Image (cartoon, rainbow, N blue to C red):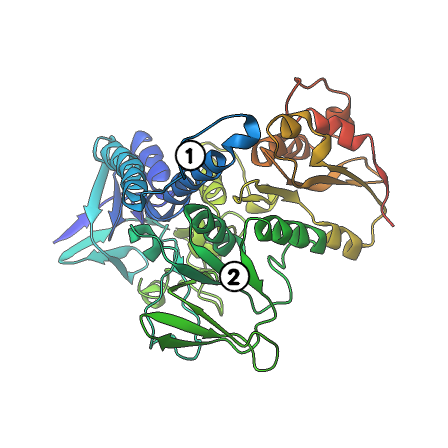
């Protein structure tokens, strides 16, 4: 017997629950499906648990630096990894339980456990149940990629998901991948007490960023004792005793790195391969991401795709904005589009990197006349007070319109300070909306008006 709803939401990541609750509140009977963990990646294996672990790692780091602040701690600083994991698990359980209870108690919303697959554009099968609805929303997220490296099937390896089960301290963690996820775990485990080596095939880490930022972050991590092996062109894995060996090059030295554990952190891929998309007429691109238009409709008009599975963001905040776009268009008579949002993200090393809009490389490639300003974090009072002066701030401005094109802040509290720039860019206001404002002292954000006062033509 077919169960009929007004809407079906497949997946309970960042966009799905909010959309289901909004649809239910609008009087639409909505089924929301989850095959594994309510809350998706962010709640269970992504942002919330990793930032909880980063907080524990920072506590250990600050404790070791206590003498720098005139504070005496008796004995060596130890890390109990079982307690670290238990704390993380507690935070995750609270978040997971909160989303689960919210959905179970929401008006007109039915939470169904199981894997949903399309049978037609309007019907989805979950086990023995066949659900039908005129509108379907896909929010199935993504998963860590496992690269096709030689020997990858011969050795035990960890991914960002597998790291959530670790309750011990690896003696030497080799991180394959020098981008955002890999660097966060590298610093985290170095602070817990592991030896850490990052292996990256490219000539520098986080190649999406400008070279100056990549170099500054590498230096910051090297100062904490993390080793880097860049330009690793011929990566091969091999079991070596109780550990693993990484063959990192065909020519350059060192050609081989031995470690106790290996983390594969080379990106993510969409959960789109087992949804029956062909039966629904939903198209994907060559990488498996569901193709969507500017309002997140798929190639089938009654089906939308939100979050990581559509390849239009890959962040929790962009997934939530996907929900806001769909809800605005369907329920609020508020025409919203993906192309209206400005790229914004952070790398949560400590200190963090916060980015909005265009990089310097992108501005130069655009050939537009631009202004640029730069200021070292050592000039920021808050940074000096906390003896955390690594990094710098950079901002780029369109010379013709005086509007901000982009900014990169690497330093203490950069992930919070960036938002005064984000808001002015979103409002379409010139940089003077910040440079002429009065900011609270002493804060990190108070130096952004000063930063804008250093603008000079970008040469």
Instruction: Report if residue 269 is visible in the image.
Output: no
Q: Regarding mark 2 in the picture, which secondary structure is present there?
A: strand
Relative to 408, is 279 on the left or the right? left
Relative to 416, is 121 on the left or the right? left
- Mark 1 sits on what residue? 331
Q: Which is more toward the observer, 435 or 303?
A: 435
- Residue 370 image position (x, y, % from top left): 83, 44
The quarter of the rendered structure image containing the N terminus is: bottom left
Q: Is residue 154 above or below residue 207?
A: below
- First of labels 1, 2 by sequence position: 2
Q: Which is more toward the observer, 353 or 249?
A: 249
Relative to 267, is 131 on the left or the right? left
Between circles 1 and 2, the one closer to the viewer is 2
Tell me which residue sits at (35%, 68%) in the image: 278
What mark, if any, has residue 222 been given in the picture? none
Q: Which is more toward the observer, 387 or 118?
A: 387
What mark, if any, has residue 198 been given in the picture? 2
- Quarter of the figure with residue 391: top right
Tell me which residue sits at (60%, 49%) in the image: 223
Q: Residue furthest bottom?
A: 250
- Residue 38 image position (x, y, % from top left): 27, 44
Q: Is residue 106 above or below residue 112?
A: above
């Amino acid at each position: 017997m077919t169960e009929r709803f007004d809407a079906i939401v497949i997946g309970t990541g960042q966009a799905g629950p909010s959309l289901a609750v909004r649809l239910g509140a609008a009087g639409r009977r909505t089924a929301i499906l989850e095959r594994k963990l309510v809350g998706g990646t962010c709640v269970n294996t992504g942002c919330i648990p990793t930032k909880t672990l980063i907080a524990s790692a920072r506590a250990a780091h600050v404790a070791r630096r206590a003498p720098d602040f005139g504070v005496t701690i008796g004995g060596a600083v130890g890390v109990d990894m079982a307690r670290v994991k238990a704390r993380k698990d507690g935070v995750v359980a609270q978040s997971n339980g909160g989303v689960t209870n919210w959905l179970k108690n929401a008006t007109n919303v039915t939470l169904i456990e199981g894997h949903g697959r399309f049978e037609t554009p309007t019907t989805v099968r979950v086990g023995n149940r066949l659900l039908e609805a005129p509108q379907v929303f896909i929010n199935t997220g993504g998963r860590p990629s496992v690269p096709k490296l030689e020997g990858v099937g011969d050795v035990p390896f960890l991914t960002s998901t597998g790291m959530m089960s670790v309750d011990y301290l690896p003696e030497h963690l080799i991180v394959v991948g020098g981008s955002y996820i890999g660097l966060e775990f590298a610093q985290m485990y170095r602070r817990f007490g592991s030896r850490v080596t990052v292996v990256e095939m490219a000539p520098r880490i986080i190649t999406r960023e400008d070279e100056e930022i990549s170099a500054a972050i590498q230096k910051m991590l090297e100062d904490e004792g993390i080793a880097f092996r860049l330009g690793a062109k011929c990566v091969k894995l091999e079991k070596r005793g109780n550990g693993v060996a990484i063959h990192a090059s065909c020519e350059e030295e060192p050609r081989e790195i031995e470690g106790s554990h290996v983390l594969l952190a080379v990106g993510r891929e969409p959960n789109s391969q087992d949804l029956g998309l062909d039966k629904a007429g939903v198209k994907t691109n060559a990488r498996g991401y569901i193709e969507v238009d500017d309002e997140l409709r798929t190639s089938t008009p009654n089906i939308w795709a939100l979050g990581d599975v559509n390849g239009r963001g890959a962040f929790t905040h962009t997934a939530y904005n996907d929900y806001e776009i769909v809800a605005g268009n369907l329920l609020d008579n508020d025409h919203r589009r993906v192309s209206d949002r400005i790229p914004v993200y952070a790398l949560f090393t400590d200190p963090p990197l916060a980015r909005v809009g265009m990089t310097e490389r992108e501005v130069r490639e655009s050939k537009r006349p631009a202004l640029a300003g730069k200021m070292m974090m050592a000039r920021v009072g808050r940074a000096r007070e906390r003896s955390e002066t690594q990094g710098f701030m950079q901002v780029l401005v369109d010379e013709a319109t005086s509007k901000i094109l982009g900014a990169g802040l690497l330093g203490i509290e950069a992930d919070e300070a960036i938002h005064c720039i984000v808001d002015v860019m979103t409002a379409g206001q010139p940089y003077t909306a910040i440079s002429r404002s009065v900011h609270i002292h002493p804060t990190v954000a108070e130096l952004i008006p000063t930063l804008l006062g250093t603008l000079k033509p970008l040469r």
